[in-house]
């Protein structure tokens, strides 16, 4: 290419870039030019904070200072052993956020967490033992009813036996370190958990038993129930005797198809979904489209990985195998309107804020990507 041709082509490229930036320019107090285009589709998602302390003004200000006004929170329950919050307790949880302009969009219950079954205080649902699981299911039903009365639209839960499995840590950029997983190091038969051997059929029976009793209540009271995928990549033969059926895309698709309902769906973690794939940088988008087109995404956890299901590290959203700008555009494409939340801190030796600096970085990253999606 000669010099004149190069300059000509470069000038054309610069002009095109300038035109694009001009179209996206937003002046104070006015909409962008793109926002004024008739028939334009808006980006509906919003940045959210996970498990913010709804009772503490400092915690709420820590998200408000970054423009975050939607949160996931857990209630304080007065009676030890009671597995649901009363309407009064939920309204008390809402008092300070409501006063400060923060919305509790998702609630975390006191059971069905992502913990390992051997550490779980209320394991009846996932052990499949009655009458314990029936008592725990009744508590979930009561929580749904009370959330409806208190104006909380969604409950996030897990159907996990193994919890979050990792095999170590590796150095990251700067002074950071990442959690790491290598499938070859996850031996199929370490000591069994107290759940014993759990085959695919056994796991699905426990899931179906739960959904058969809970989804009708969610339908009646119009409260969404959002299940987080199993964050436990395991060998095909299982791990600690457990076949983690919600750790593959096919498993998640089967899960949301049981008891079909607009109130039964996922807290979709993009990091966990990516961990299920051999080529997440190419494969993850079609899976998001599958769940999004069916209205099955109720909340998003936003983290990236390097690697694939055979070996991966959890990394910041800007440095992994998946193009997160394209992920945000895919959320817009499927009409997702919920929160997009930071998930799993990248540890930094120099961060004295206990992960707050990293989380603030991800808030800004999410907000910028939402703005980008809104003008494209």
Image (cartoon, rainbow, N blue to C red):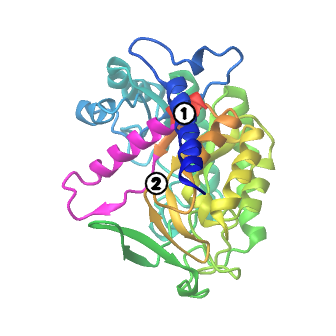
Circle 1 sits in a helix, a strand or a loop, which is it?
A: helix
Q: Which residues are magenta?
A: 342-369
Report the residue at 37% width, 29% height from top: 67
Whether residue 67 can be seen here = yes
353 part of magenta stretch: yes
Report the residue at 51% width, 49% height from top: 302
Callout 1 crowding tier (Cα within 10 Å): few <14, some 14–19, many ≥20: few
Mark 1 / mark 2, whichever is N-terminal: 1
Q: Count up the numbered dots.
A: 2
| Residue 72: mark in rendering | none
Task: Name the residue nearer the viewer: 356 or 171.
Answer: 171
Callout 2 crowding tier (Cα within 10 Å): few <14, some 14–19, many ≥20: some
Q: Which residue is mark 1?
A: 15
Report the residue at 47% width, 53% height from top: 317
Lateral position of residue 277 relative to residue 80, left or right: right
- Residue 102 position, x and y percent, is 39, 25
């Amino acid at each position: 290419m000669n010099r004149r041709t190069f300059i000509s082509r470069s000038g054309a490229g610069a002009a095109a870039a300038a035109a694009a930036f001009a179209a996206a320019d937003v002046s104070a107090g006015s909409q962008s030019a793109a926002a004024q285009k008739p028939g334009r589709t808006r980006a509906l998602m919003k940045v959210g904070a996970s498990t913010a302390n709804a009772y503490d003004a400092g915690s709420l200000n820590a998200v408000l200072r970054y423009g975050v006004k939607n949160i996931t929170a857990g209630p304080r329950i007065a009676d030890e052993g009671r597995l649901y919050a009363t309407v009064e307790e939920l309204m008390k949880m809402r008092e300070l956020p409501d006063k400060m302009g923060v919305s509790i969009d998702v609630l975390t219950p006191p059971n069905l967490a992502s913990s390992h079954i051997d550490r779980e205080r209320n394991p009846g649902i996932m052990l499949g033992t009655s009458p314990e699981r029936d008592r725990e299911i009744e508590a979930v039903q009561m929580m749904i009813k009370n959330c409806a009365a208190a104006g909380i639209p969604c409950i996030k839960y897990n159907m996990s036996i193994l919890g979050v499995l990792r095999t170590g840590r590796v150095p990251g950029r700067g002074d950071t370190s990442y959690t790491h997983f290598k499938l070859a190091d996850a031996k199929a038969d370490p000591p069994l958990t107290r759940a014993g051997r759990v085959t695919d059929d056994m796991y699905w029976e426990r899931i179906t038993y739960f959904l058969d009793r809970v989804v009708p209540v969610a339908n009646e009271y119009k409260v969404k129930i959002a299940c987080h995928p199993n964050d436990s990549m395991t060998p095909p033969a299982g791990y600690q005797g457990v076949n983690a059926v919600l750790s593959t895309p096919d498993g998640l698709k089967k899960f949301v198809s049981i008891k079909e309902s607009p109130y039964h769906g996922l807290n979709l973690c993009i990091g966990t979904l990516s961990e299920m794939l051999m080529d997440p940088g190419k494969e993850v988008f079609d899976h998001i489209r599958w769940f999004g087109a069916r209205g099955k995404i109720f909340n998003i956890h936003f983290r990236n990985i390097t690697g694939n299901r055979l070996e991966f590290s959890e990394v910041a959203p800007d440095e992994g195998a998946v193009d997160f700008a394209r992920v945000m555009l895919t959320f817009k494409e499927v009409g997702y309107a919920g929160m997009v939340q930071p998930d799993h801190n990248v540890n930094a030796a120099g961060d004295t804020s206990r992960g707050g600096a990293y989380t603030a970085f991800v808030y800004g990253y999410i907000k910028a990507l939402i703005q980008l999606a809104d003008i494209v």
